[in-house]
């Protein structure tokens, strides 16, 4: 009994000595956990704000992309029939901002927007290139003496003939300009049209200039929009005075040049 009592006393003493130490260790760990929890909560708030800001930027990019495609009539990536992958927030801010799915959706959305803008850039470059190579200027200013279409022959009024271009009268030596970028495809002397230039603009479009007095370009030469290519003349058997015969051809067929002339 005496030894048992001694053992109980010793155990009690040890507990009395160790309990405050263990309690202090527990309180210390508890404070550390509270600190870590506070830091995590703060980081979570920061990440949520950044994610929300990034999401707004992505949505703004989507709207810019939509407006550009609508204005330029350009189609890029096919729209997938799925819900937006952009994370959405509730009234109290973003919910579950650190969820892996939300982050993966946002990353996927950013990649899709990047790819869409790349395609939009390529489509826009193609449209701008086509605009540069589409006739849109008067080759020169003067009086239109004969329009495109059926007309009375200038050599026999009793006979109708189809005029494949427009005739623009001007003083001899008046500069003639290319209405678009292109490449001089052919220069020759035509029996009816006299000294003639044909420019190939690409996209199936060609322009032809007849009755010139002088040519200022060479076959195979690249020409710019507005560049002087020749001078007005009175050459060829079908000319009744100094003027330019101007044609626009699409896929090899003459079309109304007024569709390619500004007002």
Image: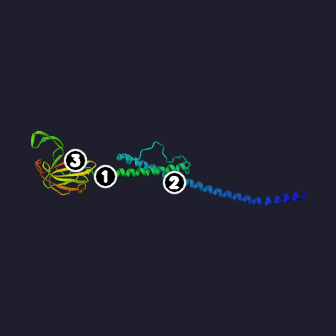
Q: Is residue 160 left or right of residue 41?
A: left
Nearest the camera: 101 or 258? 101
Compare marks 3 and 1 and give the one earlier in the sequence. Answer: 1
Query: Is residue 88 depicted above or below 230 in this figure?
Result: above
Residue 211 coordinates in the image, percent (x, y) = 14, 51
Q: Is residue 10 left or right of residue 105?
A: right
Compare marks 3 and 2 and give the one earlier in the sequence. Answer: 2
Nearest the camera: 53 or 120? 120
Dot 2 corresponds to which residue? 50
Q: Residue at x 87, y 59 (%)?
A: 6
Compare marks 2 and 1 and give the one earlier in the sequence. Answer: 2
Q: Secondary structure at mark 1?
A: helix
- Crowding at label 1, few (<14), some or many (≥20) Cα neighbours within 10 Å? few
- Crowding at label 2, few (<14), some or many (≥20) Cα neighbours within 10 Å? few
Nearest the camera: 243 or 22? 243
Q: Which residue extends farthest right? A: 1
Residue 185 coordinates in the image, percent (x, y) = 22, 53
For the residues marked 3 and 2, what is the alpha-carbon distance in whole angstroms?
57 Å
Residue 56 coordinates in the image, percent (x, y) = 47, 50
Dot 3 corresponds to which residue? 248
Q: Residue at x 51, y 54 (%)?
A: 50
Q: How many marks?
A: 3
**Display coloring:** rainbow
Q: Residue at x 49, y 50 (%)?
A: 106
Query: Is residue 60 depicted above or below 11 in this figure?
Result: above
Say which mark, if any, is on residue 129: 1
């Amino acid at each position: 009994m005496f030894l048992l009592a001694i053992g109980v006393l010793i155990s009690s003493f040890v507990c009395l000595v160790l309990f405050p130490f263990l309690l202090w260790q527990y309180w210390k760990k508890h404070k550390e956990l509270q600190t870590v929890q506070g830091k995590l909560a703060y980081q979570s708030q920061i990440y949520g704000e950044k994610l929300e800001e990034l999401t707004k930027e992505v949505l703004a990019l989507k709207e810019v992309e939509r407006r550009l495609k609508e204005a330029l009539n350009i189609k890029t990536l096919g729209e997938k029939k799925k819900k937006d992958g952009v994370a959405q927030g509730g009234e109290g801010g973003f919910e579950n901002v650190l969820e892996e799915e939300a982050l993966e959706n946002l990353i996927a959305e950013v990649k899709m927007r990047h790819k869409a803008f790349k395609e939009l850039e390529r489509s826009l470059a193609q449209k701008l290139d086509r605009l540069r190579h589409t006739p849109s200027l008067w080759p020169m200013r003067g009086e239109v003496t004969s329009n495109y279409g059926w007309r009375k022959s200038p050599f026999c009024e009793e006979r109708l003939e189809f005029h494949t271009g427009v005739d623009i009268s001007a003083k001899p030596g008046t500069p003639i300009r290319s209405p678009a970028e292109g490449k001089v495809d052919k220069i020759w002397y035509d029996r009816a049209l006299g000294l003639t230039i044909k420019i190939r603009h690409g996209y199936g479009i060609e322009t032809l200039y007849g009755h010139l007095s002088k040519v200022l370009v060479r076959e195979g030469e690249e020409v710019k929009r507005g560049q002087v290519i020749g001078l007005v003349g009175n050459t060829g058997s079908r000319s009744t005075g100094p003027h330019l015969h101007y044609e626009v051809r699409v896929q090899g067929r003459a079309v109304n040049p007024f569709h390619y002339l500004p007002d």
